Image (cartoon, helix red, strand yellow):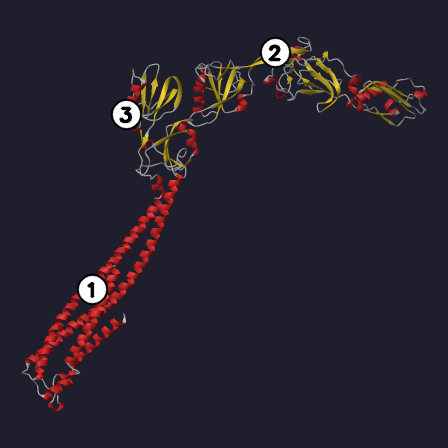
Amino acid sequence: MNATEFASFRQGKTFHERQKNIKTNPKYLSLGKDTGHIVPSTKNTNLKNKKEGFTTSTNAVQQTNTLLNKSNNLVQQSMSEISNLQKQFNDVLNHYEASQSSVMTKTHSYIEKNQNGGTSFLGKNVYVNSVVKDPSAKYVGCYADNNSRAMTTAVNGGSQTYSFQTCMNAALDAGSSLFGLQDGTDGNAQCFLSNDVKTTQKYGVAVNQNLVALWSSETAGSGSGSGNTVQLTTTGQLVVKSASGNILYSSPNAPPDCVNSGGVSNIQATYGGNCHAPIGNVTDKVNSIIQGGSNMIPISNGTFGDPAVGCGKSFDISYQCGNAPITKHIDYAEGQTYNVNCQTQMNACKFFLTLQSDGNMCIYRGTPGAPVSGAVWCTMTNGKQQDSNPNWIASKGKYGVSYILSGQALGSGEFIGSDDGKLQLIMQTDGNLVLYASTVTSGCKKGGDGKMYGGGWVNAVYQLSDIGSSSVVGQMGYVNDKNQLSVYPSSMLDYSASNKYNKFSGYDAVGNDLGAISSSSVDSCKTACNGTANCSGFVFDNSTGTCYPKKSVGTKTPNTNTDYYLREPGVKNAPSCSKDVTNIDSVQWSAFKNTNQAMTPTTLCGLSNELQREQNELNRLRAQLASLAQKIVEKIIALETMNVNLNDQIGIDKQVLDENLLKYKMLARKYANYNKNEVANIHGIVADSNTVVLQENYTYILWSVIAIGVVIVTINMLRQ
């Protein structure tokens, strides 16, 4: 309460005290003559009535004072409550403005993110109308086949009805990465499928070859035939043997130092020759020890017996290491040991046979990485090699290299090939060892469509660039702003919204028929399907002219007589979602991360979905602001009501005061007619009587009016 209001209420309090004093103090009601005060005459009823009039004024002002005190408390309380409500309102308003700012930020971000268009599917409906859009396949090669198929799946039982395109479609539908065309040309080949490259190539490259024999051992039909083998020996020779071990062929030019592979031969040993023992008396025994695998000869009577008792015996030995003669004499040899060692010579008798890139086949001393001097022997076929045969590449031979080492052999049907595949040395099943060259043509040839086709038992193999899944063809989904996919249930697909069809030639979709229409055309079948709301497509039998409308998407199966027409649907979704549909393939479909939450007719899309949480928060804050504003309005209305009551009460007070003022004027004129003493007494009374009350009434009314005016101004300011 301000100073003005306080002064007004203080005056009002004084006013009430004065009124009470006048009405209750006996000195104002009856005074003795000795007091010198006037005692009102009982005959003067006007004066008595005037006092009663004063009492009426007092009651009205008391009511005003009570109302002012009560109003003051209510104003103070209401002002505090309004202040608190205003603070709450401002806090909520700040949150509301922050949420609005967040909405604008997300809106701009969403718009920028979705402006790239083109390849972006964000916020779009996508429909799988193909396994792979614009499929392509690269030619892998031409590979042999046999009864144990290299490619495990024969499409449609291996019927010879496939072209490159239809076989590729079959691979797409089956999810196979490889397909092969065999035993036919464009439109009449067999179609085989696989996902295993290694198995597909296991029988090697299929070629049509013209063999050219450059050299042979000429052992065909000799010995055991199919049991013949060939070995490179440590004598530096290529030797063909029969199964019984008979040598059928040996290459010439064996190095003489490698006779017996450089090992020991022609042994002659004598024990006790100095004691007249016979020359060579222990040769057999020494040979027996060496043949037993030991080169260490123990010289003693225990080994050889005693040829000359009581004589200190010597030991003499002569032998060859390869073709090198070695002799040794040991006096008094009993108890000693002699080492028959040909290791140096044997080490020099290591050889390898190699198929050279110049067309020659040669034997060299040493190893492939460290040959010694020139060739031991060659076929002299250099320059006679011809085409490279992929099946003769060295890695495909018995040892995986283009050479064999001394001690290695080839059995019947085994071979080694040159590094470039232009030479092959093979031990044929007829017993002949042959060195071949060849002229080669592929086992596959181009068809009328420019694609490769294999001959009998030959696959022209292609590999798909992309592998999809036919199981998702016909599905539709919505891609949100996080590039995540939500699938539409079939109940939300609207086939009546589109008259577009995707054709799958050579396919059927068994089941889900809406009936059959005979003697029809493709166009009339489309018209019939377009007129049926739940028609998802149709199969047209070209051989009979029969149309089979379908009520749902079926599984495609190969059928040379039919074509499958899949209808592109629209979608029945929420108003915030686009109705437009973008076609994609199954590869693109599988690239999306699935939300695992199916679309519903009320699912929000796009910006509405993006801002759903923010909109909910704005709605909550908006409701809170409305509630707070309503409370503030109610408080202000209460203050206005109080203002009206005060104004009404002030109007009553003014009327009463006006009436009292008139009565005071009448009293004044009457008092003027009293004698001087009476006037003096009246003047004495004035200081403490109703005149004082009247004066203070005016003062109280003045300050009351001012206080009420302040309250009214304050309330009006609050309303603004």
Find numbered disc 2 in the image and state the secondary structure of the residue it sits on.
Answer: strand
**Seen in the image, is 545 located left or right of residue 293?**
left
Task: Name the residue that disc number 1 marks.
Answer: 643
Frontmost of labels 2 and 3 is 2
User: Percent position (x, y) of residue 210?
Assistant: 59, 11
**Seen in the image, is 561 located left or right of residue 281?**
left
Residue 532: give its label. 3
**Seen in the image, is 376 located left or right of residue 450?**
right
Kindly indicate whether the residue at mark 2 contacts the one at mark 1 (C-beta within 8 angstroms). Answer: no
Q: Earlier in the sequence, mark 2 or mark 3?
A: 2
- Residue farthest left in this picture: 43
Tell me the amino acid under the disc marked 2: Leu
**138 or 511, nearer to the observer:** 138
| Whether residue 684 is situated above or below residue 142 in the rendered picture | below
The quadrant of the image that shows the N terminus is: bottom left
Q: Is residue 23 visible?
A: no
Find numbered disc 1 in the image and state the secondary structure of the residue it sits on.
Answer: helix
Separation of disc 2 and disc 3 at Cα? Answer: 67 Å
**111 or 572, nearer to the observer:** 111
Image quadrant in which you'd find residue 553: top left
Kindly indicate whether the residue at mark 3 contacts the one at mark 1 (C-beta within 8 angstroms). Answer: no
**Seen in the image, is 651 located left or right of residue 353?**
left
The quadrant of the image that shows the C terminus is: bottom left
Q: Earlier in the sequence, mark 1 or mark 2?
A: 2
**Circle 1 Cα neighbour tier, 10 Å, few/some/many (<14 / 14–19 / ≥20):** some
User: Percent position (x, y) of residue 556?
Assistant: 39, 23
Task: Name the residue that disc number 2 marks.
Answer: 211
